[in-house]
Amino acid sequence: MNKPFPTLTTDRLVLRRFRQEDINMVFYGLSHPDVIKYYGVHFDTLEATQEQMNWFEGLETNRTGIWWAVCAAENGAFLGAGGFNNWSHEHRKAEIGFWLLPEHWGKGIMTEAMPLICQYGFGEMGLHRIEGFVESDNYLCKKALKKLEFTLEGAMVDCEVKNGRFISLDIYAKFVPRSS
């Protein structure tokens, strides 16, 4: 028997399952130059964005992760997305990711949503380790991860090619909170 999709909430936010009608906002986010500057995925057409919608669904179906649509509790407005992928059940770890529409940057949304996502990972998913891979030049994301008590473990220098040039990725991690 499958569990229902978990909805996570705060006073300001609702993290819910993606719906097909979210595709327009996902396309807006993943085609926006400010969002995709440091993000590994981008789409040039609404039709191509269906690949991302299928990816969200596939994570759940294949038990390789879970991503939420991050929405305003007040009016349901779509703000961004966040969740886990590359879930290794054997090693009890997963990679965390997050993106916000630019008009919602600097409002504390990420620092409000990420603890919910991490708590779900450590609790319901049984994770021991949550990893974040951040482009070395993405100072705002690195600042946010530090605020969320992720530890910088090091850098993978020139490990990927993006837009025809090598980029480096900083590795961040957070571990299951220890009982006292």
Image: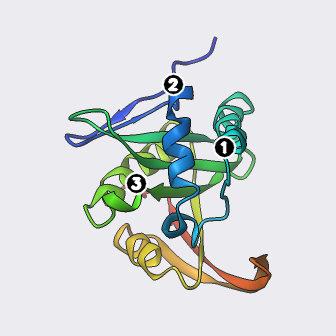
Task: Give the total number of marks visible in the rendering.
Answer: 3
Residue that label 3 marks: 114
Nearer the observer, 9 or 49:
49
* Residue 130 in which image quadrant: bottom right
Q: Position of residue 50 (x, y in %)?
A: 68, 37
Disc 1 marks which amino acid? Thr
Res 96 quadrant in image: bottom right
136 horizontally vs 107: left or right:
right
Residue 176, visible in the rendered structure: no
- Residue bearing mark 1: 49
**Mark 2 burial class by Cα count in 10 Å: few <14, some 14-19, many 20+:** few
Give residue 5's mark.
Answer: 2
Residue at (70% x, 34% y) in the render: 54
Residue 93 on image: x %, y %: 64, 54
Q: Amino acid at mark 2?
A: Phe
First in residue order: circle 1 vs circle 3? 1
Where the N terminus falls, by quadrant?
Answer: top right
In space, the residues marked 1 and 3 are separated at their CA atoms by 24 Å
Q: Secondary structure at mark 3?
A: helix
Name which residue lies at 25% across and 40% down.
Answer: 10
Rounded to the nearest angstrom, the CA distance separating label 1 from label 2 is 22 Å
* In this view, the mark in front (1 or 2): 1
Asked if disc 2 and disc 3 are in contact, CB closer than 8 Å, the reply is no
Q: Is residue 165 above or below residue 45?
A: below
Residue 98, visible in the rendered structure: yes
What kind of element bears circle 2?
Answer: loop
